[in-house]
Amino acid sequence: MSFADPLTQIEAIIILAAIALISLKFKLLDRGGIIASLPIGYVILTLASVQHFAILLTFFAVSGLVTKIRVKQIGEELVEKNWIRSWRNVIANGFAPMSIILVAELAPSWRSLLAVSGYLGAIGTAFADTLATEIGLLYPRDPRLITNFRRVKRGTPGAVSPYGYLGGTAAALITCGLAYAFKFQNQLLLLITFASSIIGMTVDSALGATIQAKYRCNVCGKLTESSHHCGKAAEKIAGIRMIDTHAVNLISTTIGALTAIALTITLA
Ligand SMILES: [Zn+2]
């Protein structure tokens, strides 16, 4: 497959248009999110394969579904995030997998196991982090901060809990199952996918606890991870202003991919 094959391109456009319509209808993505998803999907469908794309799509569908269930069960307020996924969310989770495919296209020696492992490491990290966050919110007690194990409020960046790790582990296993189902059936590859997903998820929590910007609302006094609250700019109390939750996801999915590639170079 390549950009030159017109049939592949038409196929890609039809698949992406159908997914865009479904995403709009079921509020899985807002308009910006749909626009951001198109180039990512197009690169993966035309330069990699439908199987590659199906793995990313399953992650997207399952995490969207889990978020919807959670929003229904415990309400939208708890994490103060707009739960309909935006372009920031799409880039945060899709940029690393897309980049691996582009790099593999430019450097053909990458195409084999290295590119596949990096691709799966990035998606596994995104999947593990998303399910860890969603399942972690169901934990009945306060979670602990990954850096000092003090108890913190639910939804605090960098908070970890047994439920969160169970959710993340389940997501890592699902990613391995998807890889297997879509013909990536190398045992070492599956092991590396699992390990890099858990490592990437842990890095995500560590970055959330340290460099991610945290704010206090000047109106209601609440701690928040968004720079605005109660309609006003909130005061930054920790972290780096540029690093929001999406930037943390972008960095950790990249680290998940690089971890998988490093493990593949070392072990394969
Ligand atoms: Zn407020």
Image (cartoon, rainbow, N blue to C red):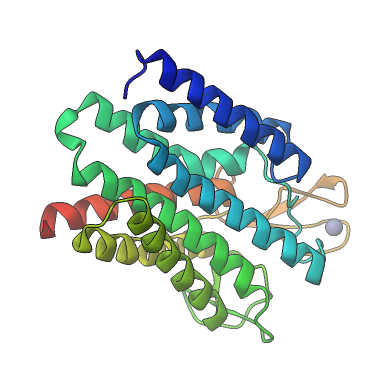
- In the image: residue 75, left or right of residue 172: right
Q: Is residue 184 left or right of residue 268?
A: right
Which quadrant of the picture is home to ligand 1?
A: bottom right
Front residue (pair 226, 20): 20
**Residue at screen point 35% across, 13% down:** 4
Q: Residue at x 84, y 46 (%)?
A: 232
Residue 266 locus on image (x, y percent): 12, 57
Task: Please identify the quarter of the rendering in which residue 19 is found.
Answer: top right
Q: Is 25 placed left or right of 181 in the picture? A: right
In this rendering, the count of numbered labels is 0
Q: x and y percent of residue 15 in the render?
A: 56, 31
User: On the rendered structure, is 112 left or right of 178?
Assistant: left
Residue 208, relative to residue 33: is it above or below? below
Residue at point 69% right, 40% down? 23
Against 85, residue 168 (above or below) is: below
Residue toward you, 246 or 70: 70
Q: Quadrant of residue 97?
A: top left
Examine the image and state in which quarter residue 150 appears: bottom right
Which of these two is toward me, 259 or 72? 72
Picture coordinates of residue 162, whole percent (x, y): 52, 83
Residue farthest to the bottom, as pictured: 141
Residue 79 appears in the figure: no
